Amino acid sequence: MAFKDGNSPSLGSKSALALLTLVGVIIGIRQIEFGADFNSFHNWSLIGCAVIFWFRLVWSLFGFIKRKVSWFEGIAVGIGYGGMVYGFTTWGTQILSANIFWDIIGIVLFSIGSVINSFSDYQRNVWKQRSENKGRIYTGGLFRYAMHINYFGDSIMFIGFAVVTQNVISFLPVLAIILNLIFLQTPKMHDHLKNKYGAEFLDYESRTKKFIPFVY
C-alpha cells in the first residue's frame, strides 16, 4: 500500500475492491445456508460479522479514504478480503459443535474493534474537512491514545471475527494481517507523515503510543 499526498476518487478501483469482497461474503453466506442448523446463533453470528464487515468496508472506502487507490491494490485487497470472509464463514461451519460463550466474546471484540476503527476515522474526517485544519496532522479524538488507533481497531475486529468462527485456522490470516499492520504499514505511514508534517509529526510521535493505547 502506498501513501501519497493528493485526493483521488478512484471510483473504479474502490468499486472493484468492494465488489470482490462482496463476492466472498455472498459465497460464504451461501455456504452457511446450505449447511446444517442454519438458524443457530453461531451461524447467524458468522453472517452478521460478514455483512457488517462489508458495509463498514464500503463506508470507509467511499467516505474516509481520499487518497488514490490503484487498480492493483483494489483487486488484490478485494480478493484478499473476499477470500478471508469466505474462509471465516466456511471454517466456522466446519467445527463439530459451537459454544455460545465464544460467539458472544467474538461478537463483543468484533463490535469494539469496528467502533474504534470507524469512529476514529470519522473523527479525523470531520476535523480534516475544516478549512483551518488544512495542512495539519490530526492528533485528537481516539488518535490521542495511539497514532494508528484505526489499525488497532481493525486488529481487534479481525480477532473477534476469528473467535466467532471457533476454528484455530482462522487465526492464521488474522496473524498475517496484524503483523502486516505493525511491521509494514505502520513504518510506511510513519515515513509518509514525517515527510508531510515534519516537526509537527515528530512532536506527536514523541508523546503518543504507536499502535496499542498505553502499551506500544
Image (cartoon, rainbow, N blue to C red):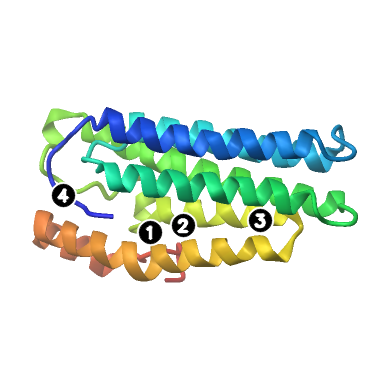
Q: Secondary structure at mark 2?
A: helix
The image shows residue 169, relative to residue 50, as above or below, that is: below
Q: Is residue 187 above or below residue 90?
A: below
Give the SS element for disc 1: loop
Name the residue: 59% across, 46% down: 85
Q: Which residue is mark 2?
A: 152
Q: Which residue is nearer to you in this view: 193 or 213?
A: 193
Measuring from the top left, give residue 202's x and y in whole percent: 17, 65
Residue 4's mark? 4
For the residues bearing labels 1 and 4, Cβ distance under 8 angstroms: no
Label 1: which residue?
Answer: 146
- Residue 32 x %, y %: 76, 39
Of the numbered discs 2 and 3, the one sitting upstream in the chain is 2
Q: Quadrant of residue 63?
A: top left
Q: Mark 1 or mark 4: which is in front? A: 4
Look at the picture and state if 107 lies above or below 95: above
Q: Residues within 10 Å of mark 2 (few under 14, many from 20)?
A: many
68 vs 151, left or right, is left
- Helix, strand or loop at label 4? It is loop
Residue nearer the viewer, 206 or 55: 55
Identified by mark 2, the residue type is Phe
Mark 3 residue type: Ala
Q: Which residue is mark 3?
A: 162
Residue at 36% x, 66% y is 209
Tell me the CA gap for discs 3 and 1: 24 Å
Whole-Å distance between the Cαs marked 4 and 3? 32 Å
Q: CA distance from mark 2 to mark 4?
A: 22 Å
Dot 1 crowding, Cα within 10 Å, few <14, some 14–19, many 20+: many
Whichever of labels 3 and 1 marks the residue nearer the N terminus, that label is 1
* Amino acid at dot 1: Ala
